[in-house]
Amino acid sequence: MEPEIAGAANHGSGASSEPAPSNRRWTVRRKAAIVEAVRSGRVSLAAICQAYKLSIEEFLAWERDMDRYGVPGLRATRYQIYRQTDTQKTG
C-alpha cells in the first residue's frame, strides 16, 4: 500500500493522492507534502524512503531546509544561495 500524501497530485489509483513513486521530478510542493506526511505520523519515514527510493539523509535535508527557510527552501535552485548564507553566518 502506498502512503497517502494530502495536497499532492493524484496519479491514477482511485482515492489515493500521493505523488507517483515513478515520477522522478521533485517539486517543492511534493517535497513539502512528503515532509508533512511523515511529521504528522500519517506515514513512517521508512515507508516513504522505500516507496520513493529516498535516502534518509535526503529526507532529513528536506526537513532541515523546510525548518530553516520554509517551503521555498526546498527549491533546488536556491540550495547554493542558502548554503553560502549559512557558511557566512558560521564563518
Image (cartoon, rainbow, N blue to C red):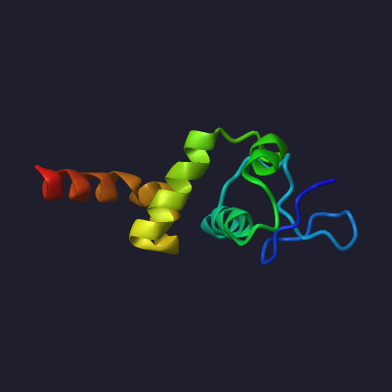
Comparing 8 with 44, the one in front is 44
Q: Looking at this view, name the residue that lies furthest to the left.
A: 91
Q: Is residue 27 left or right of residue 68?
A: right
The percent position of residue 60, horizontal first and vertical second, equals 47, 43
Comparing 84 with 55, the one in front is 55
The percent position of residue 19, horizontal first and vertical second, equals 71, 52
Q: Is residue 80 left or right of residue 19?
A: left
Where on the picture, by quarter, is residue 21? top right
Compared with 32, 24 (above or below) is: above
Comparing 9 with 4, the one in front is 4
The percent position of residue 80, horizontal first and vertical second, equals 29, 44
Comparing 17 with 11, the one in front is 17
Q: Is residue 70 left or right of residue 34?
A: left
Is there any visible trace of residue 75 in the rendered image? no
Residue at 60% from the left image edge and 55% from the top image edge: 30
Residue at 26% from the left image edge and 49% from the top image edge: 81
Q: Looking at this view, name the residue that lies furthest to the right.
A: 14
Where on the picture, by quarter, is residue 55? top right
Q: Looking at this view, name the residue that lies furthest to the front.
A: 41
Is there any visible trace of residue 90 in the rendered image? yes
Residue at 40% from the left image edge and 50% from the top image edge: 64
Quadrant for the N terminus, please.
Answer: top right
Count numbered badges in the picture: 0
The percent position of residue 14, horizontal first and vertical second, equals 90, 60
Quadrant for the C terminus, please.
Answer: top left
Q: Looking at this view, name the residue that lies furthest to the bottom.
A: 7
